[in-house]
Image (cartoon, rainbow, N blue to C red):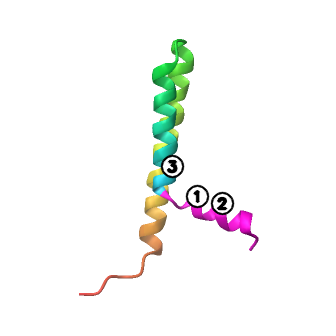
């Protein structure tokens, strides 16, 4: 696996990465004067939040079982 692919996979499975992108999108939305652009940016933020949840699910599925 090449370095670029490894990095992409790491980011894909990192919920914090996606939540950070969502926060950036919300900050940009707050600064927009065009209501349609603001709505679209908030939709983008919601999409990033969905990606974060999917990444969390993948991490839970890949986690080793916890012992007692």
Position of 40 relative to 4 (above/below): above
* Rendering coords of residue 56 (x, y %): 44, 60
39 magenta-colored: no
Secondary structure mostly taken by the magenta-highlighted segment of the chain: helix
Residue on which disc 2 sits:
8
Q: CA distance from mark 2 to mark 3?
A: 12 Å
Q: Helix or strand or loop: what does disc 2 sit on?
A: helix
N-term-proximal mark, 1 vs 3:
1
- Please name whichever residue, 29 or 61, is drawn nearer the observer in this view of the structure: 29
Q: CA distance from mark 1 to mark 3?
A: 8 Å
Q: Which residues are magenta?
A: 1-14
Q: In the rendered view of the protein, which quadrant contains the N terminus?
A: bottom right
Q: Which mark is residue 26?
A: none
Q: Helix or strand or loop: what does disc 3 sit on?
A: helix
Residue in the image at 47% along x and 74% along y: 62
Looking at this view, name the residue that lies furthest to the left: 68
Q: How many marks?
A: 3
Q: Which mark is residue 12?
A: 1
- Please name whichever residue, 50 or 20, is drawn nearer the observer in this view of the structure: 20
Dot 2 surroundings within 10 Å: few (below 14), some, or many (20 or more)? few
Residue on which disc 3 sits:
18
- Asked if the residues shown at circle 2 and circle 1 are in contact, with their CB atoms under 8 angstroms apart, the answer is yes
């Amino acid at each position: 696996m090449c370095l670029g692919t490894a990095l992409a996979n790491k980011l894909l499975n990192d919920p914090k990465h996606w939540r950070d992108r969502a926060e950036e999108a919300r900050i940009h939305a707050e600064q927009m004067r065009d209501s349609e652009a603001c709505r679209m940016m908030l939709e983008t933020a919601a999409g990033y939040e969905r990606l974060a949840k999917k990444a969390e699910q993948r991490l839970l599925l890949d986690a080793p079982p916890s012992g007692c």
